[in-house]
Image (cartoon, rainbow, N blue to C red):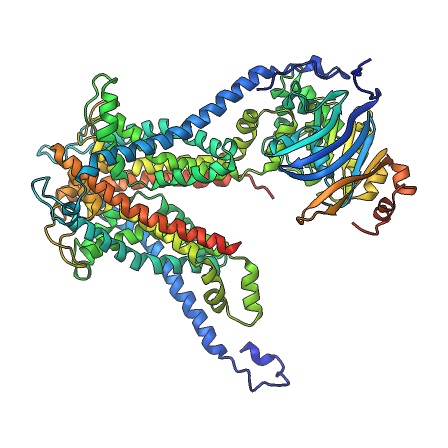
Amino acid sequence: MTATDPNAFSQSSSAEQHFSSDLSGRYRLDNIFRIASWVATVTALVVLAFLLIDVLIDGIPRLDWQFITSFPSRSAERAGILAPLVGTIWLLFVTALFAFPIGVGAGIFLEEFAGDNLFARILEVNIGNLAAVPSIIYGLLGLAVFVRVFLPITGGRTVFSAGLTLALLILPVIIVATREALRAVPSSLRQAGMALGATRWQTVREHVLPQAFPGILTGTILALSRAIGETAPLIVIGAQTFVPFVPSFRGTGFSALPIQIFNWVGRPQAEFHVNAAAGIIVLMIVLVAMNATAIYLRNRFQAEKM
Amino acid sequence: MTTSQLPDSPQNSGLWQPNRQLSKSMELLAKIVFGAFGLVSIATTIGIVLTLIFETFLFFQEVPIWNFLTDTQWTPLFTNSQYGIIVLISATFLTSFIALIVAMPMGILAAVCLSEYAPSGLRKWLKPALEILAGVPTVVFGYFALFFVSPILETFVPGLRPFNGLSAGIVLGIAILPTIASLSEDAIYAVPQSLRQGSYALGATKRETVTNVVLPAALSGIVASFILGIARAVGETMIVTIAAGQNPRLTLDPRVPIQTMTSFIVQVAKGDAPTGSIEFITIFAVGMTLFLITLVLNAFSFWFVGRFREKYE
Amino acid sequence: MQTNPSTAVGAGTTFHVAQANYYYGSFLAVSNVNLDIPERKITAFIGPSGCGKSTVLRCFNRLNDLIPGAHVEGTIQYRGVDLYDKSVDATELRRRIGMVFQKPNPFPKSIYENIAFGARINGYKGDMDELVERSLRKAALWEEVKDKLKESGLSISGGQQQRLCIARAIAIEPEVLLMDEPCSALDPISTLRVEDLMHELKEQFTIVIVTHNMQQASRVSDMTAFYNAQATEKGGKQGYLVEYAPTQTIFNNPAQQATQDYVSGRFG
């Protein structure tokens, strides 16, 4: 750092006898600390880059049309990801169908209607708690409730059960995102609406919600992309790895991309590991597309606000 | 209705006939429906708790709780079955501990870098990049641990087996690092600028300001991020299932295959255990243990944040 | 005896500012400032908001270094040494030039630690307990907090917090005390206490205070500098120094019409 001349200033007090700040030593520590913080950040990003490059190198050669359109097979070269890919898209829809309205509704309730009563406070603590519950526990819940108790409705180990489970898993995330988006809407807008004689709900529906909607949508898409990458709850619910047909909503036997990847990783033959890498690339493409949509929405939303 | 107590509007009253009854009913309906949606989240918690309690109760009718807590072997799938949960807990503890050694210092340093050292233009790119890292599915991290990290570690860690707690733990740490970094950064960024200026004005250097003033002021948020990171590490499934192995053994040696609580659940669930069988209820007993651990972590986090949060303004 | 012979600044002058322009990036925030701030006197900076009085103040301890793009042209000397000279270290400079801020900003630590912090990082070798007590006594806070030194600095009232911040600043034995609207967040009684304190502290320190409150300036200060702002083409505000004179002159017989208008409350 700067070369310091300790005698740059003339002395007027006796302070120098009391203080001996070893400036060069302090600056050395400063430098070490600064460099360490950069090293930590760059390392995290380099690891991310390595991870992506490693997977790309392994998987790209395997990625072709045959891989996308084929059913599982005992031979790695003929195997494909059609069934898991369709399963993942199914899950996306079913999860969104349940999680979006329920999550947004609960968020609206907490932010706009609940006030500060006991129910609201319990709900709040509960949501905070649920967010930290491991996803595999949700799998156990889905297995016990949706697969077994609701068997006549869900058809057991089906896309329906899995979608419901994932919906519960991301519900807290959507509720929190909804609340944040609503909170970002200035309260003057609410007051303006209500001063015109509108009820709270009319104000929220006509003015607040349209303002908050892009933010809610962004949060929901990010939550859904998390659900799509989940593996553990699907295994517990009973996703299968050998599904030689296109899965249906309530039909027995479904798969999903992470399940298929997990299965291939676990095979001893190296050719299947290549398939796993190719499957990861497909999964990542789906996720990147979803994230890009979310970021696009967020940026457009922020641009409009200016 | 309250409106009737207001005096009648003198003019044009015929033109204004709002259906107040309808708007009020809609308001009530919205409140009830959305309140019911809120109940879904409470029902989820109740569902989880009841399910786990019910199945765990069945489990303890088969296996004495004493054995569950004190056995030192975990062999539920063998004829001579033993159920020492400590075996699985120790494995979970080991991988989580390695993960924390990686993620805590790196996470907090990265958070400091983002909020204090990185120019704001760069920060706008770095933070989303870290969040991408957080969005990578854990099955991908598992692949990375098994096929990339383990082979590299094998070259300089003697006696390292292909499946081991070490590479699983390290990659687990990388997986929870963005959570810790991002939440800590939020807490650090929220520390008022006036505190930093107060410190600089006393002749403190940047590092002295960060370590003595900013980090203590952000302590409750940082600890909360650590706890959430620990909860993630303990409950994480795919990385440890893929990379740490399926061998339940009581050891603190990170070089050998082990089995965590979560990977045991996966192992049994994959095998399509029949409903009501002992294997089936065992995964609920293990799940219950896992749930209790995260519950304790959560309670501690709530308590700590409530106790130590500094209120500015 | 202690003046750098290369400058024409008399002994008795703490800061010498000549033809200084203050920039944020390419934006000229304050232009053409010329000031000599006398030692062991209280100098007040007054003027409407946006006139740059805080900017000038914050350059005396180079706190503006922390804002990317902020820089100064012209001469700013502290006891004859150029403040922005390469050989001057900002950290060491801030040890010698204390500062008290607009809003009380005690650290979220104990009252004791708030004061000990600055001394510790600057390598204080004396008795820490004694230093804490002495500083708190000087800031007229000792009697109120002596039984709760271990409690958080945020637990006391706003006026006490501000006196804690003053105690914190004088604990490291600075030569100058910069005060940036130190009373704007305080009630009238607390304000009075801080003003009394300033009168005592000026025996020992050179004090520069920025204030919005003209009564305060006339009550406490020996010298007063009046700044004004003009709108720029781009819609920003550019500050400049209108007049600098003994406080008596500024308030009773100013040379400039703008000063007269401002101190009599006709604008601002």
Residue C35, percent from left and from top: 80, 31
A3 lies above or below A156: above
Q: Is residue C161 left or right of residue B184?
A: right
Q: Is residue A106 visible in this depiction of the protein?
A: yes
Q: Is residue B240 visible in this depiction of the protein?
A: no
Residue B48, percent from left and from top: 29, 49
Q: Nearer the viewer, residue B207 or C197?
A: B207
Residue at left 44%, top 39%?
A: B125
Quadrant in the picture for residue C117: top right
Residue at left 43%, top 51%?
A: A298
Residue C198, percent from left and from top: 79, 32
Farthest-out residue, right: C253
Farthest-out residue, front: C233
Image label count: 0
Q: Nearer the viewer, residue B194 or C34?
A: C34
Q: Is residue B189 left or right of residue B42?
A: right
Q: Is residue B307 left or right of residue A216?
A: right
Residue B121, percent from left and from top: 49, 38
Residue at left 51%, top 21%?
A: A31
Q: Nearer the viewer, residue B30 or A145?
A: B30
B55 lies above or below A111: above
Q: Nearer the viewer, residue A224 or C116?
A: A224
Q: Is residue A175 left or right of residue C95?
A: left
Quadrant in the picture for residue C204: top right
Quadrant containing the N terminus of chain C is top right
